[in-house]
């Protein structure tokens, strides 16, 4: 440590002992950006949750527990809420786009920071191990040998999926949902809106002709419900900082229950195409 740095640290210690507050360090720019993006990601998630709740109620729960006529009335009523010009862009498209873009950007920034900080730390510790911009394997093995007790503890806290893929099940479900929701919206909202001016033609009778006798279509829709409810429930636990095993188990039961209702709903809807 240089003499100048020692003097600075000594002065800072003297200030603290005399009750003089030290000058707070400013946050790095990337930390500020990540905090802002996290706020956007969380707010947009709660906004999109309103649409998810309405949509699942109208197309998953109601057709499974009530007759189709009642389900059609509920679907028409709910559509007036989330397909009106004043709410659709905010409640559906805007919130979904903000959630996906902000979440993806956060992970890219963190990945970049992790790579750059790792290279910087290794270079400062042992510059000889870095040649032509490549980090030799000797440094990694030395660090692993220096702290063998930390590795098991870290692995025990991470899921099997995270250890072998590097992403949590919550994030993986979100990435899978992006193309699935896009395809679902294209077929049942955007294309009817483009060719017919609205999507009122897309009712349960219309849907029955698309899934009747098509096992793959039923499976894809059931998978869409499963991944959506899983991603939403796990995301809420994360945002609300809920770590209770009992609550997590209840959320898992909810995911399985809604997926089962989706299968029953698809069965009831498919019977319309046989009439």
Image (cartoon, rainbow, N blue to C red):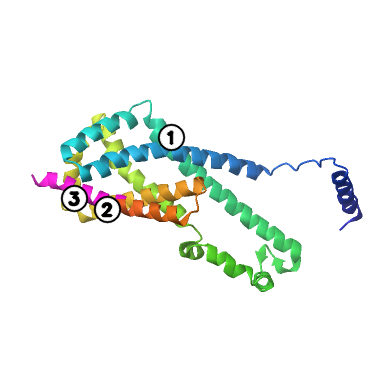
Q: Nearer the viewer, residue 156 or 193?
A: 156
Furthest-top residue in view?
A: 86
Q: For mark 3, what is the residue?
A: 267
Q: Nearer the viewer, residue 260 or 108?
A: 260
Image-based side of 126 in relation to 168, left or right: right
- Dominant secondary-structure state across the stretch colored magenta: helix
Q: Residue placed at 29% from the left, 40% from the top?
A: 57
Q: Secondary structure at mark 1?
A: helix
Q: Residue placed at 47% from the left, 49% from the top?
A: 237
* Label 2 – label 3 distance at C-alpha: 11 Å
Q: Secondary structure at mark 2?
A: helix
Quadrant that contains the N terminus: bottom right
Q: For mark 2, what is the residue?
A: 260
**Residue 251's mark?**
none
Find out whether residue 266 is within the magenta segment.
yes
**Residue 94's mark?**
1
Furthest-front residue in view?
A: 246
Q: Is residue 85 visible?
A: yes
Q: Nearer the viewer, residue 241 or 209?
A: 241
Quadrant that contains the C terminus: top left
Magenta part of the chain: 258-275
Q: Residue 98 in the image: x percent, y percent?
A: 47, 38
Q: Residue 226 in the image: x percent, y percent?
A: 34, 52
Q: Residue placed at 65% from the left, 65% from the top?
A: 134
Q: Nearer the viewer, mark 2 or mark 3?
A: 2
Going from the N terminus, do you reach mark 2 or mark 3 first?
2
Q: Residue 171 in the image: x percent, y percent?
A: 46, 53
Q: Residue 169 in the image: x percent, y percent?
A: 44, 57
Quadrant in which residue 94 is drawn: top left
Q: Residue placed at 81% from the left, 40% from the top?
A: 21
């Amino acid at each position: 440590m240089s003499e100048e740095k020692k003097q600075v640290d000594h002065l800072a210690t003297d200030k603290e002992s005399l009750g003089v507050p030290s000058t707070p360090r400013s946050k790095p720019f990337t930390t500020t950006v990540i905090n802002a993006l996290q706020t956007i990601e969380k707010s947009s998630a709660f906004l999109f949750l309103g649409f998810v709740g309405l949509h699942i109620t109208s197309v998953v729960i109601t057709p499974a527990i009530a007759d189709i006529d009642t389900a059609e009335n509920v679907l028409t009523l709910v559509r007036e809420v989330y397909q009106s010009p004043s709410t659709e862009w905010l409640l559906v498209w805007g919130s979904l786009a903000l959630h996906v873009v902000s979440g993806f950007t956060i992970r890219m920034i963190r990945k970049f920071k992790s790579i750059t900080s790792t290279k910087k730390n290794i270079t400062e510790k042992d510059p000889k191990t870095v040649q032509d911009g490549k980090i030799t394997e000797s440094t990694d093995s030395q660090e692993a040998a220096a702290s063998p007790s930390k590795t098991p503890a870290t692995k025990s806290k991470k899921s099997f999926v995270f250890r072998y893929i590097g992403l949590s099940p919550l994030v993986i479900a979100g990435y899978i949902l992006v193309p699935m929701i896009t395809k679902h919206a294209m077929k049942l909202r955007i294309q009817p809106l483009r060719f017919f001016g609205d999507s009122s033609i897309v009712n349960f009778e219309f849907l029955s002709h698309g899934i009747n006798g098509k096992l793959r279509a039923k499976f894809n829709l059931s998978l869409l419900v499963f991944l959506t409810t899983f991603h939403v429930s796990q995301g809420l636990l994360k945002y609300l900082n809920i770590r209770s095993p009992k609550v997590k188990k209840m959320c898992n039961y909810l995911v399985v229950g809604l997926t089962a209702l989706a299968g029953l709903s698809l069965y009831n809807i498919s019977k319309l195409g046989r009439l």
